Image (spheres, grey):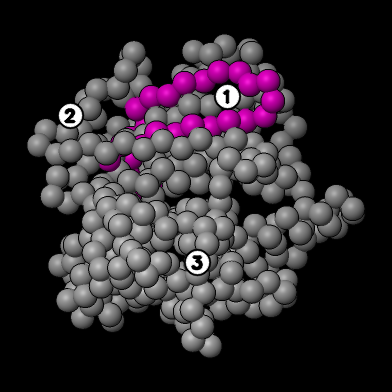
Amino acid sequence: MIEDKNPQRTSIAQLGEFGLIDHLTKHFEINQPSTLKGIGDDAAVLDFKDKKAVVTTDLLIEGVHFDLAYMPLKHLGYKAVVANVSDICAMNAKPTQITVSIAVSNRFPLEALEDLFDGITHAAKEYNVDVVGGDTTSSQKGLIISITAIGEAKEEEIIYRNGAKENDLVVITGDIGAAYMGLQVLEREKQVFQVNPNNQPDLENYTYLIERQLKPEARTDIRELLEKLEVKPTSMIDISDGLSSEVMHLCKQSNVGCTIYEEKLPLDPQLISVCEEFNIDSTTVAINGGEDYELLFTIALEDFDKIKANPNLTVIGHFNKQSEGIHLVTRANQKIEMKARGWNAMEE
């Protein structure tokens, strides 16, 4: 679907591993005061002084997590960073450094990896994180990307998944479901392209959904927003695997039940319109979609007045006794047991 307009192909073998590393990492800058030593030694050296470090890692595999038929490599590099930065945000911490490791087959020329690292460089600047290390190796098939993100926070600022209490409110940032429908649009256009390679896709009506899939953003703004509102969440998680799965994670870790209200789910108008076009239920998409990289968190009931007027935040339900289970209350006021039907990395 995406034609390579650049005929130049430089074999990676010409550079060798260390030449490749030097070439791809020469544009990375050090901006964080906690970075004492970045790329160029056996290990990075970080100094967080009186703060705690939080660490997360993510693995993206071609054919499982992304399809290069419609995912530009620059966008892929950006998104790979976002996925990890989002996990740092879900701990209520500030992202500071990342490491980047790739395994690549010989079908990728140097120019392709330059595009990938352009996206990584852009994301590193956007989120003000230092790239401090990584690894490169060959792959028998396709492209594999592994990014580790490091962040910092004071001990009392860190939010875990196990702090939710009965009667706490369930809050979500932004809107959900759009990334999944963006993927459905791209998959449909890929099928059309395979039948007729001369067909040019018209994606004008799907701009927001496709952007949410190809170039999502991590909610680094929420930490500062909650601080200004004087609200400290009791638990938090990012919505990368689907709302239903993430709600169940919080319930399991906090030993509580939960009630979510269908009418409260924040859906973008374009999502609703495209769900009708595809004949897919928008609530099903919102609950099970995934890859939205929004934050799901809980707050004490008495903090409701502090957040109720904020356009970035939506209260979608509340926690209750564990024995009451996990349910969705429909617009027709029916109570349906929620199942975890989001992304499962171990499914075929």
- Residue beneath label 1, please? 103
Is 99 placed above or below 10 here? below
Is residue 321 among what the camera can see? yes
Q: CA distance from mark 3 to mark 2?
A: 44 Å
Q: Amino acid at mark 3?
A: Met
State which mark lies toward you, 3 or 2. 3
Q: Does 322 appear in magenta?
A: no
Which residue is rendered at x = 31% and y = 70% of the image? 320
Quadrant of res 199: bottom right
Q: Earlier in the sequence, mark 1 or mark 3?
A: 1
Crowd tier of the residue under label 2, counting other residues whose Cα lies within 10 Å: few below 14, some 14–19, many 20 or above:
few
**Closer to us: 205 or 279:** 279
State which mark lies toward you, 1 or 3. 3
Per the picture, the main secondary structure of the magenta-coloured stretch is strand
Crowd tier of the residue under label 3, counting other residues whose Cα lies within 10 Å: few below 14, some 14–19, many 20 or above:
some
- Where's residue 168, x and y in %? 26, 70
Q: Earlier in the sequence, mark 1 or mark 2?
A: 2
Q: Amino acid at mark 2?
A: Asp
Is 85 placed above or below 276 here? above
Quadrant of res 324: bottom left
Q: CA distance from mark 1 to mark 3?
A: 38 Å
Determine whether the residue tagged by mark 3 lies in a helix, strand or loop.
loop
Residue positioned most to the left: 50
Q: Does 131 appear in magenta?
A: yes
Q: Earlier in the sequence, mark 3 or mark 2?
A: 2
Q: Which residues are magenta?
A: 126-151
Q: Amino acid at mark 1?
A: Ala
- Residue beneath label 3, please? 338
- Residue beneath label 2, please? 47
Which residue is rendered at x = 37% and y = 47% of the image? 87
